[in-house]
Image (cartoon, grey):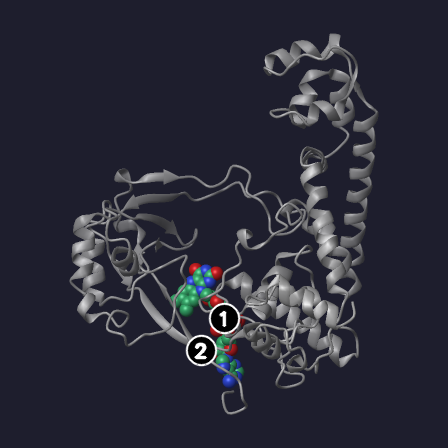
Amino acid sequence: MIELGFEAGRMKTGTPPRIDGRSLNYSVMEEQKGDENPGKFSFSDTEPLKKQLSCWITYTNESVHKELEKGFDRSPMFQGRIKGLGPRYCPSIEDKINRFAERERHQIFVEPEGWNTIEIYVNGFSTSLPEDVQYKALTKIPGFENAKMFRPGYAIEYDYFPPTQLKMSLETQLIDNLYFAGQINGTTGYEEAACQGLMAGINAHNKVHEKEPFILKRSEAYIGVLIDDLVNKGTQEPYRMFTSRAEYRILLRQDNADLRLTEKGHQLGLASDQRLENVNTKKEAIASLSKELNEMRAVPIIVNEGLALLESAAITEKVPIVNLLKRPHIGMAELKKLDKQIEGRLNKYSQEILQQVEVALKYETYIEREQQLAEKIESLESYTIKPDFDYDRVKALSSEAREKLKRIRPETIGQMSRISGVSPADVSILTVYLGK
Ligand SMILES: Cc1cc2nc3c(=O)[nH]c(=O)nc-3n(C[C@H](O)[C@H](O)[C@H](O)COP(=O)(O)OP(=O)(O)OC[C@H]3O[C@@H](n4cnc5c(N)ncnc54)[C@H](O)[C@@H]3O)c2cc1C
């Protein structure tokens, strides 16, 4: 790839040792039960998970750290043999005790790997120190005194191609019809890789069929945030998709993923007619419940007793039910308790619909504000820039901006505005220059 002109870099990642779960003493660890209502990855009819395995929490201590330090002179990381940057957010245990020397202990999540295995994943103890050092240090962790290690932890180093060499469709700028997805773009993680694979696949298909590229906006999906960040900002360290990277977090909720994306999936031929129909039925139910809530009135004599129990102010006249729903501590469940008639009307709707409408109403102003912001930014997205635009002609641009713009070649002014190193002043200079 380098011979073809691609710029390449190195990153590293690692994994903790795997332990025989039967050799651990759980009585000295804290139990961490699974979620009572675990969410699902998709809007399917599958039953919510009931049978769950607990995780356990324990901690490292001074003597664990001392044992680990004994291996530092044999560590490929500290000896400089491995130079790539690792994930900042899940550093190895040796990184943690080195960087945060003042911390006396680090949390360890003891995670069973599944129902059909006795193997344990020691989350928080990723390491590439020599096997004997790992083992000795492990046995100093409370509950691990008699631990049997199936496999030691290790780290690997790998190549990546800075993703600023891509178009928003994930096609490379350098070679037509070549798409990059996943770890080679500097991301880490299964979902990060999977979503890029999906997008690159869709776009390769679209290209072959002479259709427009399929690009998700930052305000539409986390996939949109991820690809936009990669292409426009690049990444020096393994990139993970965190909610904190999205500016439209209130719009990008898991409860509305189907409302945001199913129609697009259907247009691409990926989501079935049935799935689209389910989403349309859901939309209708949401509209109908919202209408009912706006029509229903709370009557003082009926609801005030219940409001007092909830330590919420009494009402002095009839008010729309939505007003009560906007109060803190009052959700659909509380509304039902306030008034039998309201309960009867709300019970017609599924929990999913009730929750969706509750979220939409409670956060109405915030949602609207984000929506407006997204629309404002979106207007910049419609200003396209020619792929061969000559940035050298625009003398007023800062040299950093010119260098980045020539390298990244943004497709729109919106995309340009998000490139690190391109200031708002550069954006307005170019906007004026392009006559927008
Ligand atoms: C030790 C370790 C622990 C990790 N732990 C986690 C974790 O707990 N959670 C998490 O979310 N992520 C984890 N990751 C990261 C995650 O595994 C990767 O980011 C993700 O699997 C990358 O997927 P990918 O499809 O981009 O690449 P890969 O899964 O590496 O797939 C690339 C494929 O291409 C094939 N290939 C390479 N060259 C060629 C060629 N010339 N011709 C044909 N085929 C070729 C390879 O054989 C491979 O099958 C971990 C990674 C490592 C190394």
* Disc assigned to residue 14: none
CA distance for labels 1 and 2 = 9 Å
Number of labels in the image equals 2
- Residue 213 versus residue 47 in the image, above or below: below
Quadrant in which the C terminus is drawn: bottom right
Q: Is residue 270 visible?
A: no
> For the residue labelled by badge 2, is the local secondary structure a helix, a strand or a loop?
strand
Seen from the viewer's position, the closer of residues 415 and 142 is 415
| Residue occupying the point 74% across, 68% down | 432
Question: Residue 325: x, y in percent?
Answer: 69, 26
* Residue 10 placement: quadrant: bottom left
- Tell me if 341 is positioned left or right of 87 in this view: right
**Circle 2 Cα neighbour tier, 10 Å, few/some/many (<14 / 14–19 / ≥20):** some
Classify 344 as above or below 210.
above
**Secondary-structure class at tag 1:** loop
The amino acid type found where label 1 is placed reads Gly
Q: Are marks 1 and 2 in contact (CB under 8 Å)?
A: yes
Query: Residue, x 67% and y 83% (percent of image)?
Result: 177
Q: Of marks 1 and 2, which one's residue comes earlier in the chain? A: 2
Q: Nearer the viewer, residue 371 or 279?
A: 371
Q: Is residue 79 above or below residue 372?
A: below
Residue pointed to by mark 1:
186
Q: Amino acid at mark 2?
A: Gly
> Quadrant of residue 293 in the image?
top right
* Badge 1: residue crowd in 10 Å (few <14, some 14–19, many ≥20): many
Task: Quickly name the residue at label 2.
Answer: 9
**Residue at the extreme front of the image, as rendered:** 396
| 100 lies left or right of 63 | right
- In this view of the protein, which residue sits in the foreground, 425 or 235? 425
- For the point 83% across and 32% down, the residue is 291
Q: Measuring 55% from the left and 38% from the top, which residue is drawn there?
A: 37
